[in-house]
Image (cartoon, rainbow, N blue to C red):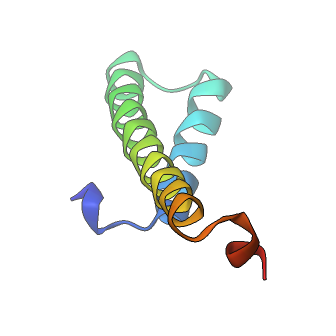
Amino acid sequence: MENEKTFDEAMKELESIVNQLEQGDVPIEKALDQFQEGIKLSRYCKRIVEEAEKTVTTMINENGQEDILD
């Protein structure tokens, strides 16, 4: 399910969950569900960023920094 989301979609959903939880007027059961979903989204976004960092590092190591910046 979350693999179908783009990074931006996942971040928007995570921001929405955080905003709702910060308001504090969410029933505890729903807050727990939202918290768990937020953790999943956070991990998903972290994986995307880590993969992007690895790709950039690989490109720099293979091509040299000058090739990437040109």
Residue at 39 percent across and 16 percent down: it is 28
| Outermost bottom residue | 70
| Outermost left residue | 1
Q: Left or right: 38 with respect to 23?
A: left
Residue at 57 percent across and 56 percent down: it is 12
The spot of residue 13 in percent (x, y) is 50, 52
The spot of residue 10 in percent (x, y) is 46, 56
Dividing the picture into quadrants, the one containing residue 15 is top right
Q: Left or right: 8 with respect to 10?
A: right
Residue at 39 percent across and 37 percent down: it is 43
For residue 42, above or below residue 59: above
12 or 4, which is in the foreground?
4
Query: How many numbered tags mark residues here?
Result: 0
Dividing the picture into quadrants, the one containing residue 64 is bottom right
For residue 39, above or below residue 44: above
| Outermost top residue | 28
Residue at 77 percent across and 74 percent down: it is 69
The spot of residue 1 in percent (x, y) is 21, 59
Q: Left or right: 11 with respect to 67?
A: left
For residue 11, above or below residue 41: below
Dividing the picture into quadrants, the one containing residue 8 is bottom right
6 or 13, which is in the foreground?
6
For residue 43, above or below residue 16: above
The spot of residue 40 in percent (x, y) is 33, 37
Quarter of the image with the C terminus in it = bottom right
